[in-house]
Image (cartoon, coloured by chain):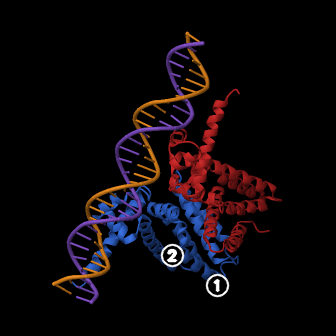
Chain colours: A blue, B red, C orange, D purple
Amino acid sequence: MRKPREEMIAETRAKLIAAGRQAFGTVGYAAASMDDFTAGAGLTRGALYHHFGDKKGLLQAVIQQIDAEMTLRLNRISAAAPDRWQGFVAECVAYIEMALEPEIQRIMFRDGPAVLGDVSQWPTNNGCIAALSRSIEQLKADGVMGDIDTEAAARLINGASSHAALWIAKSDDPEETSRRAVKGFRTLLEGLRVKG
Amino acid sequence: MRKPREEMIAETRAKLIAAGRQAFGTVGYAAASMDDFTAGAGLTRGALYHHFGDKKGLLQAVIQQIDAEMTLRLNRISAAAPDRWQGFVAECVAYIEMALEPEIQRIMFRDGPAVLGDVSQWPTNNGCIAALSRSIEQLKADGVMGDIDTEAAARLINGASSHAALWIAKSDDPEETSRRAVKGFRTLLEGLRVKG
DNA sequence: ATAATTACATACGCGGCGTATGTTGAAGAG
DNA sequence: CTCTTCAACATACGCCGCGTATGTAATTAT
């Protein structure tokens, strides 16, 4: 075995990220004790501080991982659609649905921004914004979407989506609320489409 | 002086809310030490626990106060507009601008949701959502806005606004970004307007 | 082979939160 | 008017969690 060392290190990092992700996603960032969830991974806080600097550093790594997964899912969805507009709409709806998952909601839309500031602002994890922006750019090039600032549109849609998800998740009847939200969302997007 | 007692109590409550608001709005909820900011108000943590139960209780009171102020401002703005549609747009733009104020941004859009969950969900402080909903309801009745679920529209617009504010506040050039955001936002709203 | 660095674990102190326990002064009963 | 009671705070205590400083074993470099 030439380099089991690096593998062990990567494994340790992965274990810490997984443990943190689990804890952050369930009890939340503030209530997650580093002693507890590192012990759960068979490690100590020493390892965490060594690899990630501090608790926020680990959160950052967790967010980066989740963002990558979300971006991948979004890209697959838009690629599978019959045309660009439908792909775009499907992408937005999927974004809402992802935001319904408790782990994503808690880490990406709640604790993340609260602890690290606006997460989508950093260079490392703007994957979802970037994915939305690319779709919008293409739609504008195709003449399907009217004249609107690309990044502004991406941000606004992103905000509307995440808030819609919060609304749905907190409602008494998530199923019904989800239908209302998605319907309203489609109407909103339709308003951006060039009429033909 | 008939009842200086109740006045003293109300004053104490107001002092605590003011001190908490100041601390939460500047250093943030998590970093705000109850010992510190209560001492700054000439009180102790004992008074805080007596009146508000715990730290979250105080945050709740602070949020309620700010929400009332924001609602008042929104209502005045929409009332001063020449027609309902312009009033609605002005209301939305004002909402973005309010969300730019550091105190509002920090307390209402960051720490509030992170600590208490979706703030707009509670009965006590959905003032801004309610204000938006009323405007939308009237526009629909006037035939100016198309068929869209009122609450869904209010939520989506609310989400887009607050996210836009975050984007602006964090950008390198807030002035320029603000122009882009507001312009994009107007375009988005225009898509909801019935064409005539 | 020894030195130096990496990858963790252990130990310590500090600050903050929540609670349990005073203490004071005002309102109500007789 | 006095005594009781209770509200409105202040004080005191213990626990937990974070960050850092330090220790240690294993790997790499020379």
User: What is the number of callouts on the image?
Assistant: 2
* Residue carrying label 2: A127
Residue at position x 47%, y 72% from top?
A67
* Relative to A116, A62 lies left or right: left
Q: Position of residue B196 (x, y in %)?
A: 80, 68
Marks 1 and 2 sit apart, C-alpha to C-alpha, by 21 Å
Q: Position of residue A191 (x, y in %)?
A: 68, 70
- Kind of element beneath mark 2: helix
Q: Residues within 10 Å of mark 2 (few under 14, many from 20)?
A: many
**Circle 2: residue type:** Gly
Q: From what the image shows, is residue B15 above or below residue B129?
A: above
Q: If the image is split into quadrants, where does the N terminus of chain B sit?
A: top right
Q: Are marks 1 and 2 in contact (CB under 8 Å)?
A: no
Which quadrant would residue A140 be assigned to in this image? Answer: bottom right
* Residue carrying label 1: A141
Q: Nearer the viewer, mark 1 or mark 2?
A: 2
Q: In this view, which residue lies farthest toward the right?
A: B82
**Circle 1: residue type:** Ala
Numbered mark located on residue A58 in the image: none
